Amino acid sequence: MSDKFAVFLCLLGGFCFISWKHSLIGVTDALKLAGRGIIFLGICTWLIYMLPRLKSFFFPVCQELPDSPLQESDRLRQEEARRVQQHQHNDKMSDYSERVLKPRQNSLLQQRTERHYSMTGETWRLTQGFPVGGEEDQECLDVGVDESPNQGARRRRTLLQTVTPDPARAQPPKQKKVIVLPDEPPEDAEGVVRIALKCPSRRTIHRRFLKSWSSMLLLDWMMKSGYPPALYTLCSSFPRERLRTAEGLSLEEAGVLTHTLLHVEENST
């Protein structure tokens, strides 16, 4: 900006000097003319400098007025509508978890249980069996002429699976365990801890326990929530390690001393 102004002054001075050389005015008149030009430039510069201040003086910026009671009521109404929408969204998530996610997990659990029994050989354990060197060996040795080793193994496996179990050795069906959790203690009771259970479905449930209660209640709570201890385990948040649970072990002895967040994780084996 200063370089441009200096160039402008030089050009103005040259113009004044050339005009004075080719005119009939004297030195005094030329100095007067130059002084008037400088005064004019000073006035223009001052006007340019003062123009924003004059604009703000004649056109002041209006400050925002505080919220009126009507605006405050609108804001409260909008907040209430947002809270209602959030509650509705939470209800929809819970309903989706109960209708879709939980049946899907139960179906997956049933498939894994069936695969576990089929791979560990529980089918042949239910049969009566044969004495060594008896009827089983005779049937297994009756191999056809055109039978390959794979076909013979398949035939023997089919024979073992189709043997009718002995009615005398059939075990009665086990009764389903009914899980009954004790009532939650009041929050101001002595030795109360609040435990949050974070499930694999990203759902978090809360419950209050006494530190003197058995740690097996945590497994019953997890089982009642739809996660059997045979396939899932409880882990602490930090450090991430498996929570010790036993029949004669209380929550305090298991390491639950304060409000705790536990994670339900699937067993690796």
Image (cartoon, grey):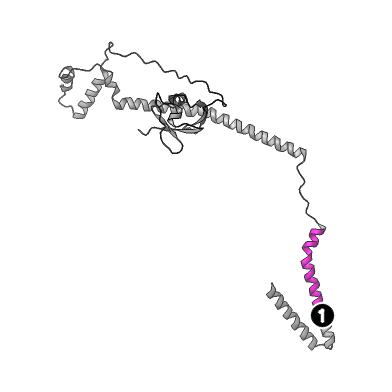
* 217 shown above or below 73: above
Is 183 left or right of 78, judged from the image as shown?
Answer: left
| Residue at image location 67% in from the left, 36% down from the top | 79
Camera sees residue 104: no
Residue 104 rendering spot, x and y as whole percentages: 45, 28
Q: Position of residue 262 (x, y in %)?
A: 47, 33
Give the side of residue 111 with respect to residue 159, left or right: right
Residue at the limit of the structure toward the top, as seen here:
168
* Front position in the image: 242 or 63: 242
In this picture, is 80 found above or below 170?
below
- Residue beneath disc 1: 35
Residue 53, relative to residue 16: is it above or below? above
Helix, strand or loop status at disc 1: helix
Is residue 38 within the magenta segment? yes
Expressed as whole percent of the image width and height from the top left, the position of residue 137 reads 16, 20
In the foreground, 256 or 1: 256
Q: Amino acid at mark 1?
A: Gly
> Which residue does the image show at 39% across and 26% down from the upper left?
246
Task: Relative to 142, say whether 36 is above or below.
Answer: below
Quarter of the image containing the C terminus?
A: top left
Residue 13 in which image quadrant: bottom right
The rendered magenta stretch, by its main secondary structure, is classed as: helix
Residue stretch rendered in magenta on the structure: 36-57
* Left or right of residue 127, residue 99 in this image: right
Quadrant containing the N terminus is: bottom right
Q: Quadrant of residue 150?
A: top left
The residue most toward the front is 190
Residue at (72% x, 37% y) in the render: 74
Q: Residue at x 45, y 35 (%)?
A: 236
